[in-house]
Amino acid sequence: MRRATGFLIIAALTLFIASMLTGALWLSPAQFWAALWHTGDPVHSMIIWHIRLPRTLLAFFIGAGLGASGAALQGYLRNPLADPGIVGISASASLGAVAALYFGLAAHYFWALPLAAMGGAGLAALVLIRLARDDTPVTHVILGGVALSSLAVSLTALLMNLSPNPWALSEIAYWLMGSVADRGFSDLGFAVPLILVGITLLWRSGPALDALGLGEDTARTLGVSPGKAGRLVVLGTLCCVGAGVAVSGAIGFVGLAAPHLVRPFFGAMPGRLILPSALAGGCLLLLADIVVRLLSGPGTMLYLGVVTALLGAPFFLYLIWTQRRVWV
């Protein structure tokens, strides 16, 4: 377990440095070090401090929030295919942001888009918290999340359909594809504290999730309240996913893949998987963002959500294929 943790930390640091060096202007390690301490080319320092550093940190923390949320949801719902998108928080956050774009609020107020996204995620979380009572089966929470997700996706499509002009529609469409490009320290200052709070809440739910893995009745005999555990998971997912979607747009499949990548090394107990999944999620999104920069060129902008979907969809099919015998 210690070796696996050390490997994740080394992988995160390696990808962090690779992300800082990669882009339209490639930097050598010596140039990066000089730019970091403002002892080299001023242009390199500007690129490092104002473009690549906030982008890299944002990609890591958003991925970490998605990974931790995925591990907690898979433990709470006792479903290895659970993903932050399944409970409707991601789609509701996207709906809030699209509404801010549709009504023109995002063009006049910088904080309108992230606050609208968090508001949409918060409304979904309130519904799920209401559902996650002590006497509510987990399957009902899943069905409620699926219904919320479907409703939010439908309303988002309606707003796109009613867009007053092609430019507004293209702005919404590009935002929904997800990206951490052109993000600054203001976005970082908004998202990272909320993501850290969310990961802390999810980590605190770990012992309860371990008990719930034995069954709800057994968990109650151990003094664990399934409803309280569900509320912690929903609130943690709200902070992690809502804050991430608010500044980057919709990014999928990271929360699904990260727990599966670390499960062979840390075991199946959800409480042990939350922090390793956060590290793995951060590494995955950093890697995806590096791929975006490598494949993008003049006039050809590739979006982060597209890359994660292209990589995540085959992984999702693979999981379904390997789990089919368990379900039969």
Image: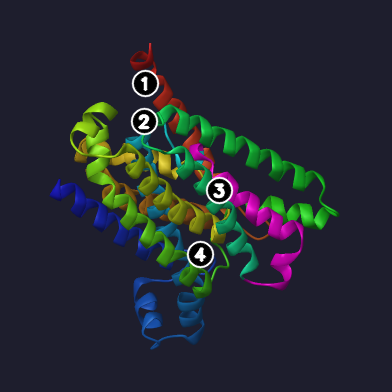
Task: Residue under label 2, please give it.
Answer: 80
Task: Residue under label 1, please give it.
Answer: 323
Q: Image height check: is 317 above or below 152?
A: above
Outermost residue toward the left? Answer: 2
Which segment did they paint magenta? 86-110
Residue drawn at 54 percent across, 66 percent down: 24
Q: Secondary structure at mark 3?
A: helix
Q: Secondary structure at mark 4?
A: loop
Q: Quadrant of residue 213?
A: top left
Task: Residue under label 4, please give it.
Answer: 23
Left or right: where 217 falls relative to 292: left
Left or right: where 57 falls relative to 153: left
- Disc 2 or disc 3, which is closer to the eye? 2
Mark closer to the chain start, 3 or 4: 4
Does the residue at mark 3 contact the one at mark 4 (Cβ under 8 Å)? no
Residue density around tag 3, few if under 14, some if 14–19, many if 20 or more, within 10 Å: many
Does the residue at mark 2 contact the one at mark 4 (Cβ under 8 Å)? no
Q: Image height check: is 168 above or below 130?
A: below
Magenta region includes residue 109: yes
Left or right: where 230 falls relative to 141: left
Outermost residue toward the bottom? Answer: 39
- Disc 2 or disc 4, which is closer to the eye? 2
Rounded to the nearest angstrom, the CA distance separating label 2 from label 4 is 36 Å
Is residue 177 among the parts visible in the rendering?
Answer: no
Residue drawn at 36 percent across, 63 percent down: 16
Does the residue at mark 1 contact the one at mark 2 (Cβ under 8 Å)? yes
Viewer-closest of 116 and 157: 116
